[in-house]
Amino acid sequence: MDNSLRISHEKELNLEATELRLGLPGSDEPEKRSVVRSNKRSSPEASEELECMSKGNMNSNGSDVTSDHDQDNVVPPAKAQVVGWPPIRSYRKNNLQQKKGEEGEGSGMYVKVSMAGAPYLRKIDLKVYKSYPELLKTLGNMFKCTFGEYSEREGYNGSEYAPTYEDKDGDWMLVGDVPWNMFVSSCKRLRIMKGSEAKGLGCL
Amino acid sequence: MEGQAPSPLPDQVLENVLETVLHFLSSRRDRNAASLVCKSWYRAEALTRSELFIGNCYAVSPRRATARFPRVRSLTIKGKPRFADFDLMPLNWGAHFTPWAQALAQSYPSLRRLHLKRMSLTDRDLTLLSLSFPHFQDLLLTCCEAFTTTGLAAIAANCRLLRVLDLAECVVEVADEEVDWISSFPETQEETHLESLVFDCVECPVNFQALERLVARSPSLRKLRLNRYVSMSQLHRLMHRAPQLTHLGTGSFSASELDPEPDYASAFAASKSLVCLSGFREIWPDYLPAIYPACANLTSLNFSYADINAHQLKSVIRHCHKLQTFWVLDSISDEGLQAVAETCKDLRELRVFPVNTREEIEGPVSEVGFEAISRGCRKLQSILFFCQRMTNAAVVAMSNNCPDLVVFRLCIIGQYRPDPETLEPMDEGFGAIVMNCKKLTRLAVSGLLTDRAFGYIGTYGKLIRTLSVAFAGDTDLGLKYVLEGCPNLQKLEIRDSPFGDGALRSGLHHFYNMRFLWMSSCKLTRQACQEVARRLPHLVLEVINSEEGKADDIEILYMYRSLDRPRDDAPKVVTILH
């Protein structure tokens, strides 16, 4: 059943309009929007049978609607998750969330750090650091390199390596360009580039 | 005549013979049957039972268990019900091991093996264990909690004959001072007896040098599962120390050194006995080719923490012709599942876990991959499958293609999801499963389900022992069908389904045969539960309500049979009806 057919079916059944995602969930997109569905069951007969539903059901809901055409600023409320559903052990959920490190759920905010020329990755927890100097010192130790002085105009001019990061929009930025808190909330991953590579990066 | 011992009485001869014979009886079901024959068989069986299985730690008191079975060498105890794993139970609910630890220390000096599942055990318990049993060999803890590395250090230090230390999915608390427990294995011991060391769930770094030395002096080591603090190059060193390993958990499977990298593939090639691979906790997919040399011999592969795509999976799976057990994330998508179906003709167990646990319209795996698996893997016995969409047709296909299914657990993440093609409930799919899979003993249902589905289960699911239900059914009839129709039902866990008092009453004839019944967010009232408690005095009904006010409606009912008085270690939120 292709997309258009499915949409018309859902409209017939009076579902609240739902967003059609263009990408699969879990794929590496800068904006992950969870599709938000209404509380209603999909088939008319079934909704009558809903009368005797227990009270514990469906405390998750969100009938807000967005589409892919919306402004980037509008982020629909994530659908509240029902406790213990789906039935996956928190142990497993936590392990995967650490991997993803995108939304900073849970206690840590892990992002991958790679370095030009090195065939390995590290992971750091951004929440552990309070400022750029702290972060840069750690990165320098981890990868045995130095970054030199940062200036707004010239970046890390003069040093062999420069720390950069990919933000929520998928753009590569120089570490230090935005205020620390904004950086922590928008940084998806870090990369230590060669100084020459990093030239030309800057604020949007 | 004088000086000669009196010849044994005929009864005693018979008892001796009986004991000798009963020693050979290993199945606990056979032993239970034998113990019912008559008093002398009961006694003989009790004296010869060396493996004791306790499915519910509250079904019998430690005192009663040790009194009846005085010569136990191997003990398994299970505590919390499975739904506790999903945060549905209050903290500190119970399943405390301490009273058992004390009883065992007193009664079973020859204890060799202990397996605990979903129990709460403290460092003091572990220390007591380590000091009380001079012959202690095997400790297996599955989904346990409340202990720290301090307890592990005690086991390492004191159990000289330790053969197995398996920690599976435990929550190991962080001690105030992190204890280097690996270093606690005595270095003076030239060779350890270790055969299995599993600590992938221990979330703190280990002293690698101590670990390497330990592995080097453990010639019997066959199973080693590392935690994610062990890097690729460290793994490499360990593999060279222990080329005899059969089961390997790889740790992080990513690197952290800048040094020129060793030849990882050669380490896997040298480990000619490897049949089971797991770990890959922080996988750097570029390293996947390292495991190719081991793939042809693998019977078990666990990629369930490895976020890899179809292409990456294919490069590995096409070598894995002997694979029987496969755990994976849905990141491999339907395409990855198709590749599995094409190669793994011997597959018996498949588990597909979701990367994204939120409800979505679509997900990376669906009925397409599911049906492909059913066509390719005809010997499938056990499946656990998370997805966002599934059709009845695909489930019916699996019921026909895989008649050997014993365990069928399908979790459609969206609640009340109908078949997206036909918009019908999922009744027919699950109906086909219970109809066609005649060996089915465990079933978990999901999606939009009416009472009809339960009618099928009650009619055809005659061998079902464990049933999990969530967000399903219409009326009491649903539960009634199951309680009346499934004579082998032992574990029934239900959440958020409209089953009420009438349904509960329909199970009165069967509740003593069950290990437990769990019903949360259903439509039970306190009065009905009270009535059941009165009519069945050996049942314990635990009622858990988070708020004081709503006394009549039951949020959680956890009900189980017990030979002893109800427990006295329950937290305030738990009310025990009797």
Image (cartoon, coloured by chain):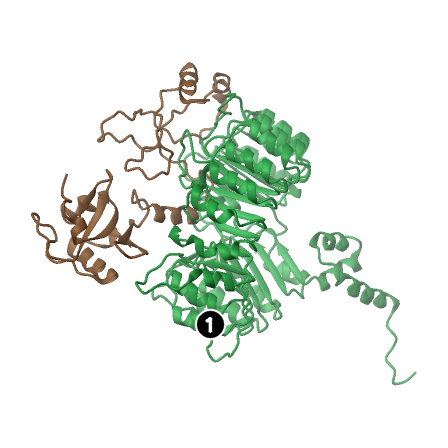
Chain colours: A brown, B green
Image coords of residue B118 (percent x, y): 51, 52
| Residue furthest to the right | B1
Quadrant housing residue B407: top right
Would residue B312 be found to the left or right of residue A145 on screen? right
Q: Residues within 10 Å of mark 1 (few under 14, many from 20)?
A: many
Which residue is nearer to you in this view: B383 or A191?
A191
Quarter of the image that includes the C terminus of chain A: top left
B68 lies above or below A50 = below
Image coords of residue B68 (percent x, y): 68, 60
Would residue B181 be found to the left or right of residue B39 on screen? left
Q: Secondary structure at mark 1?
A: helix
Residue drawn 49% across the image and 52% down it: B94
| Residue furthest to the bottom | B3
Q: Say if residue A202 shows up in the picture.
A: yes
Would residue A91 be found to the left or right of residue A31 on screen? right
B35 lies above or below B459 = below
Quadrant housing residue B220: bottom right
Q: Say if residue B468 shows up in the picture.
A: no
Number of callouts in the render? 1
Label 1 sits on what residue type? Leu
Image coords of residue B317 (percent x, y): 51, 47
Chain for numbered disc 1 = B
Per the image, the residue denoted by label 1 is: B214
Which residue is nearer to you in this view: B81 or B355?
B355
Residue drawn 52% across the image and 63% down it: B271
| Residue furthest to the top | A12
Image coords of residue B414 (percent x, y): 45, 31
